[in-house]
Amino acid sequence: MLKLVLAAAYPLDCRLALGSRAEGNEEIVNLIGRICQVLLCLTLCSTLMAQQPPATPPAGQPPVQSEPPAAKPTAQQPSQPRVQTQAVPSQEPENIENMFSIGLFDWIHTGASTSLHAGSQAVLPPPHEVALPGRPYRAYGLTVTAPMKGSSRLEFSYTTLNVNGHITAPTDLGLFGGTIAQGEPLATAYSLRHLKLSYNFLTYPNPPDAKLRIKTLWEFHYIQLYPSVIATVTAPDQPLTATQSIKLPAVGLGLEYVASRHFRLELRGSGMYIPRHTALGDTEASAVVRVRSVEVFAGAKLLHFKTSSNSDTYISGMVWGPDAGVRWVFR
């Protein structure tokens, strides 16, 4: 029996060795044979168990699900505090177009150079050329601005001034259809009323995102003049006079430097000339300081005018001088 087991479990060489040794020590051979039998049984059992399908649980019992291994708790890192950043408000350039304002100004220490001339309907001689001396007084006015669509605004201004003077007739004169002898003491005067409607259109940049801004001006001017000459000796109660007027559209250009919300510089000029008819030129420059809703401005103004020469006598001249005023701004 031992020989059959050894023949099945070991090759020929092992059997020869065991056979030879069995003759010498039968107990050892018997022990080895028992060990081989046990090893052979274990080998066969493990092979049969591996080939058998897994056992199914009895009916009515749910299959046993293996629980996944519990996850190891991870160490939580301390949360970092959130840093809240405050948004810095963007400082947009001041839009001076978007405002409604009312202002008053005074034309201070104004100078003038005005004279009368012979028109196309004058009867010559005598000549019609005479200067009107004097310094303007009661020169003041008002301004009103209103915002318009887009980056533009509408401005209305009214200016009034008066000039008085005295001269002696340098020659015989013919003025407004009358005559004056040479050497006659004369009292001269004229009044001026100027109404202007101006559409200020922001040309560059638009919208106003820069400090230096360029504007185009589209205006209409109405100037009324009332010159008079009185011969104080021969005809003190018979003034030689005529009401004259200028009605003209005008175009111009304006520059503004808006340094900040509280300070800006303004320069503008406009005009129109029609040959052998009327002419005008209007220029002003000012520095503006704003405190809350009040603006204080100071600068200079110049106004040139000429009435139509299609008359007996027409008037032309220029008025200039510094001005200053205050303006109330409403948003």
Image: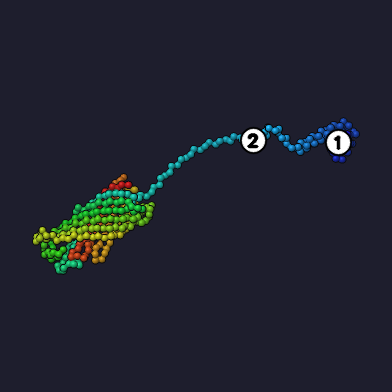
Q: Is residue 92 left or right of residue 276?
A: right
Farthest bottom residue?
124
Q: Residues within 10 Å of mark 1 (few under 14, many from 20)?
A: some
Residue 189 position, x and y percent, is 16, 58
136 lies above or below 40: below
Q: Closest to the observer: 83 or 246?
A: 246
Residue at 27% over, 53% down: 156
* Numbered disc in front, either 2 or 1: 2
142 lies above or below 43: below
Residue at 30% over, 49% down: 100
Please count the marks in the image: 2
Quadrant location of the N terminus?
A: top right
Residue 68 position, x and y percent, is 64, 35
Residue 192 position, x and y percent, is 21, 57
Residue at 18% over, 60% down: 243
Residue occupied by mark 2: 68
- Tell me if I can see residue 226 in this picture: yes
76 lies above or below 216: above
Q: Earlier in the sequence, mark 2 or mark 1?
A: 1
For badge 1, the amino acid type reads Val
- Tell me if I can see residue 320 in this picture: no
